[in-house]
Image (spheres, rainbow, N blue to C red):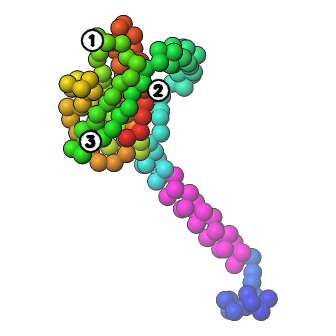
Amino acid sequence: MTMLRAFTTGPFTGRHAAILTVLFFLVVITVNFIMARAALQTFGGTVVENSYVASQSFNGWLHEAKREQDLGWGAVAKRRSDNRVSIRLSGVPAGTVTLTGEARHPLGTLADRRLAFARQADGSFLSAQPLPAGRWQLRLAVNAAGQVWRSQQNL
């Protein structure tokens, strides 16, 4: 009790215990509120409108991904010094090829960017617009020979 007397003018009472308990929970609630607010303001995860409806499409998405994988197509994306994106495709049949892309910031702090690509003389594709500096997730869609192939890469 001598240790507790150093901070009080008299004996440690129920009133002191109640004040400490209230202060403890005020600190816990305040920290929880601050952390929850920070989490909600910085959340950059993937969200769907209706989880149940999305789950009903899941097997179809798996089947589509398997079909696309069986095509054997590939894409390598690189950022050039001017921040434009260069794409080199492999395994895609010759002929008319259309390439579209969308760049997403992984933390959701920057707006998504649609990218238009033009075919270059060497067969690669080059984005018309540059991407801002930083890390991006690039989603590509290739249309060729009546087939669609999708890919996602980090830049």
Q: Are marks 3 and 2 in contact (CB under 8 Å)?
A: no
- Category of crowding for the residue at label 3, using alpha-carbon neighbours closer than 10 angstroms: few (below 14), some (14–19), many (at least 20): few
Q: Left of 149 or right of it: where is 7?
A: right
In this view of the protein, which residue sits in the foreground, 70 or 101? 70
Three-letter code for the amino acid on which mark 2 is drawn = Glu
Q: Position of residue 128 (x, y in %)?
A: 20, 31
Q: Residue at x 35, y 34 (%)?
A: 77
Residue ID for mark 3: 80
Q: Residue at x 56, y 57 (%)?
A: 32
Residue 28 magenta-highlighted: yes
Quote the CA–CA distance across marks 3 and 1. 25 Å
Q: Earlier in the sequence, mark 3 or mark 2?
A: 2
Q: Residue at x 26, y 42 (%)?
A: 80
Three-letter code for the amino acid on which mark 1 is drawn = Thr
Q: Which mark is residue 96?
A: 1
Q: Quadrant of residue 123?
A: top left
- Front position among marks 2 and 1: 1
Q: Main secondary structure of the magenta part?
A: helix
Most extreme residue toward the right is: 1
In the rendered view of the protein, which quadrant contains the C terminus? Answer: top left
Whether residue 4 is visible to the viewer of this picture, yes or no, is yes
Q: Which mark is residue 49?
A: 2
The segment highlighted magenta reads 16-36
Q: Left of 8 or right of it: where is 125?
A: left
Q: Position of residue 140 (x, y in %)?
A: 36, 26
